[in-house]
Amino acid sequence: MEGILSQVSGLNQKDKAVAYASILTDLLARRDQTSFAADTHILVENVVQENVGHVIGRQVLSELVKALDDGRIRNNALRKQIVQDILNTIQPRIITYEEQVNALRFQLANILEGDEEWTAAAKVLMGINLDAGQRAEEEKFLVYLRIVRLLLEDEDSVQAETYYNRAALLAPSSSDKEALLQFKLCQARIFDYSRRFLEAAARYHELSWVPEIDEGERKHMLSAAVTCAVLAPAGPTRSRLLASLCRDERTADLPTYTILLKMFHDRILRPAEIKDFEVTLKPHQLAKIAQSSNDRLASAVAEDEEMSDANASTRTGPATVLDRAVMEHNVLASSKIYNNITFSGLGALLDLTPGAAETMARKMIEQGRLKGSIDQVEKLIWFEATREEDDAQGKAGGLGDVEQIAEDTGAPFTKRWDMQIRLTAANVESIVQHLTERGLVKFGTVQA
């Protein structure tokens, strides 16, 4: 190869172009590709020299890039080696051969993606100069979107969010429905990885209704929506989201339906009930969470409390994302059951120190996710009797605006107690009616 190229160097520019094209044709026509990589390296190294000329160099490289893209080299490992070698060879002259370099990068990204080297493929695409050749905004959008998808495969949500923001600026210019659906899915996944579970659940649930998506994928997105809703911070917004998911008939077939139903009905969750749910979670959804120094100080157990109850928990806060979600839910659920609760009582319920339980309740009250007040002298948490969350759940659950007229007795706690008795009786009646319809319960006639 070196001898042939030395002969070509003495020709004029017109004859050089024909000679290099002939050499490349013969090289690609070889059946024995043992020395193909070495000969290609010599050829590329020769044509990019200054004495050959940029026009001839671009012509030869364009033909070589086209041949590689057409599948002339069937061995992926050999093709990958050749593409990487060409990129390394022309790197010092990347400005001159920018179009060819970008085409080679797309090819290398395809090869790496096929080998499931997601991050490596994304980094190759990041090196593409999208401003070269006056690319359309939609083409740039597709490249950014592909980078985001590749980074998310390796759960690199931080860098993926950077390129997602770039893609978001170009999304309005795209008319590709499939790409826009992928864009929304990437948004949901980024919300998920960033622990913005409320936004992630809403986006997943929205995508689960899109008919263009495969049925299996829609079911997977619905399951992801339920998981994110369970992990979301407890409060009125999550209550509306849980109501929307419970109203969806498809969730009844999911393995996570039981815990969804219990959270929707504000029932206290026990440790044994969340073990099955924990198995379905991804690593980032079980991530450890750090506690601030202020929270650790506020959650410390006082000496007199340690002496008074030897069985009190020594935990000063939730350890994982799931742990925190369950604890916050149990605080909210306890507000539906009790008028007030002591710090130690709530701590026993949450398996936390009394101080840690107070800290968690205080944060929820500050953020408007829990209605109540704290009496630090008596060490009590008082829960306010409001119907705001219940009304929100009823409307989201499809009940609409239900006018409830209740007698004003002037005794708020008695009124609340009466309402709890009424709801309990209504639930018992509903269960009995359901069992009767299925023939599981029969009532005999009473004879005098």
Image (tube, helix red, strand yellow):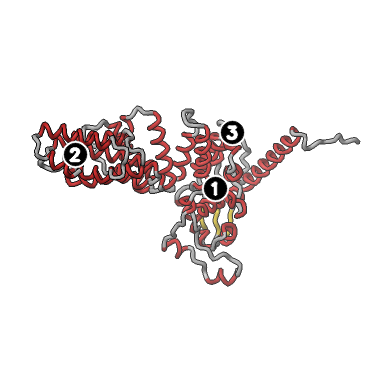
Q: Nearer the viewer, mark 3 or mark 2?
A: 2
Q: What amino acid does circle 3 point to?
A: Glu
In-front residue for pair 77/116: 77
Q: What amino acid does circle 1 point to?
A: Thr
Res. 243 mark:
none
Residue 156's spot in the image, x, y percent?
38, 48
Query: Is residue 93 left or right of 204 when viewed as pictured?
Result: left
Residue in view at x 49 percent, y 49 percent: 282
Determine which residue is flagged by label 1: 280
Residue 65's spot in the image, x, y percent?
26, 36
Residue 273's spot in the image, x, y percent?
61, 51
Q: Is residue 350 above or below residue 75?
A: below
Task: Sort mark 1 into few (<14), some (14-19) or many (20+) by Cα contacts within 10 Å.
Answer: some
Residue in view at x 48 percent, y 63 percent: 299
Query: Is residue 419 left or right of 176 when viewed as pictured?
Result: right
Q: Is residue 67 above or below residue 151?
A: above
Task: Sort mark 3 into few (<14), some (14-19) or many (20+) by Cα contacts within 10 Å.
Answer: few
In-front residue for pair 418/241: 241
Determine which residue is flagged by label 2: 97
Query: Is residue 395 left or right of 284 when viewed as pictured?
Result: right
Marks 3,1: beta carbons within 8 A: no
Res. 249 mark:
3
Marks 1/2: CA distance? Answer: 49 Å
Query: Is residue 115 left or right of 133 when viewed as pictured?
Result: right
Residue 205's spot in the image, x, y percent?
49, 36
| SS for dot 3 | helix
